[in-house]
Image (cartoon, grey):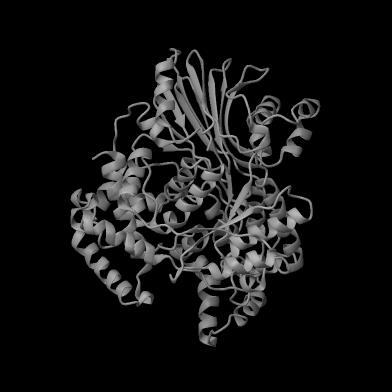
Amino acid sequence: MSGIAGILYASGRDVSAEALGHVADAAAIRGADGMTLWRDGPVGLIRFHHATTPEAVGERQPLTGPSGATIAFDGRLDNRAELIALLGRRGEALRACPDCDLALALFEQAGDGFLRHLTGDWALAIWQPDARRLFCARSPAGWRPFLFTHDADRLAFASEPRALVVGLALERRLNEAMIAEHLTQRVVTPGETFFEGVEALPQGAALDYRGGMLRRWHWDDAPYEDLTRASEGEHIERFTDLFDQALVACSRSSTGVAAQLSGGLDSSSVVSRAVHLNRAGRIAAPPTAISAHFPGSPIDESAYSNAVAQDLRLRLRIVSGGVFDPDVARAWSAATLYLPLRPNTIDTQQRIFADLQGRGERVLLSGEGGDEFLNGNHVHWADEIRRGRIDLIAREALAMPGKSPLARLRSIVMESLGPHLSNARYRRAAHRQMWAGTPIQDWLRPEWIAQTGVLHRIMDRRPARTLPTIAAQNRYAMVAYPARDTLFGGSQAFAAWHGVEHRHPLYDIRLQRFYLGASGAVLLKRGVRRHLLREAMRGTLVEQVRTRTTKARFDGAVIEGLAALYAERPIEQQWPVRLGWVDGAKLAAIWHRLHESHLHGSGDARPSPTFGALWNVAALDIWLEHGFGL
């Protein structure tokens, strides 16, 4: 996968070739097509090349424009025609140029405000020599990483943490407050990493560095359309148009495009709709559907993925599911400084990415985003009660299947009035802080929790953007999800390790703005989640999958992975326990109960919040020793 990096000295001293070379060498997982290093006095920029669109093949980056500004651009623009039109005569001359040329030309024409015209997945840095200013920004989608470190004389940035920590030989210091947010499963602070002094530019944010001073702001303030009074048919039509637009954009590739087909509703919708668009002449070639199968395992979903492939008359490419290997997890963390990937992620992605790499395919489409944006809930009831729409709330409550009259009444009171009467319920509804009002887990040492100040961080944090309705705030909480870099950064980097760009059509910014204004009544209807997606896929997706309401649970893979790790290092010997953060005896007791229920097949007894916590502690143990370097 591609990437960028750079160094700027505010004092004006030159960036040496050696210093820039160290940063480049430390980001070895980026740049399958090589790298270009560019220096001009106090600034040095690096472009790690990996062409995944036809226009990017042979691109020249870093690129200097007529104004003297130089850009390092990592990403993909999905609205090229619109941008070319905005650029007028200059745009016509750039019609066949790479995306970076369009971005730089628009910056030179419109200044910092050009960001609002860009649609796609990107991160960028622009050096303006006359102003001695470095301007950096990240797309609202936030899948392209942008890390940086700064002081009064230097700002350095990179797509990879290792490029900064190793490339600049930074002193390694733990950010225990951020680690505490992670372990309490209450991540609320965007822009921080586990390394003290290494920050991540949040999605939809920008920074300006000049004269040793850093300014940062949230630029993504685009309005959204209120669709709460639109009909279901209007929602379906609008969603389908935007989904098709996202699929066409994500299918622009310099190689063949593959799409992961798990058999779930989201990935099956991506594959089925893309195939229909190909047959309608809107996509040049259908995606190659690729699926990981687990024969004989309760997590095997091959019946559903096969049904999709048969309905579409596609030849399904099948890989066998992988097995978690503790040695591979440790080697990954040491090589990249990322947390190890969860066993239920690595078991599918490792074989799929390797398959694409072996065939020279560089683009993989996912179904990420369906759970996050389309599942639906009753948060909009809190808005409707404020509008006096008790009749609407009552109709939706009466349509809830399997609920007693008392349970329906309780739901109406708690979900419509609760957010207005209780701060904890408001935070759960508006910010998706489902832990609000609950105590910190007792297996975390209270003295360490107090030392980190995490309770104050949790209470003081406010969202980057305030929206007028609770439902819009609830959905925006996923757009600006502060834990995305921690939880998904390693997965994206793992794709890059294999030369694969992982694209997520359901995260398209145009779709995200649609989600913000959509009516909650069409997302969750009569107890069925993702109602809108199901209706939009009627006639496109095979009924067996379109009407599917079950999901495979991959808990067993994580439990078996934990068992393998604990066989080599028991909980009581792990670094989070040795450092005084975690009560090893309490966590070991939780593990014992969980493992026993797994061995005896009583999966319903699994305490899901602690299930994730066990993995977080084990993964952190690996990272502390092999990534951080204890």
Identity of the residue drawn at 70% across and 29% down: 97
Q: Where is 315 relative to 391, above or below?
A: above
Residue 486: give x, y in percent of width and height: 42, 47
Residue 373: give x, y in percent of width and height: 58, 59
Identity of the residue drawn at 50% across and 52% down: 352
Task: Depth check: give the residue in front, 163 or 137.
Answer: 163
Residue 335: give x, y in percent of width and height: 36, 38
Quadrant housing the C terminus? top left
Identity of the residue drawn at 25% across and 61% down: 443
Q: Where is 341 relative to 146, above or below?
A: below
Task: Depth check: give the residue in front, 85 or 296.
Answer: 296
Task: Depth check: give the residue in front, 558 or 191.
Answer: 558
Residue 101 in view here: yes
Q: Is residue 578 rendered to the left or right of residue 553?
A: left
Q: Is residue 3 rendered to the left or right of residue 487?
A: right
Q: Where is 196 relative to 538, above or below?
A: above
Q: Is residue 116 rendered to the left or right of residue 88?
A: left
Rendering quarter of residue 587: bottom left
Residue 376 in view here: no
Q: Where is 284 relative to 36, above or below?
A: below
Residue 416: give x, y in percent of width and height: 56, 71
Q: Is residue 239 rendered to the left or right of residue 25?
A: right
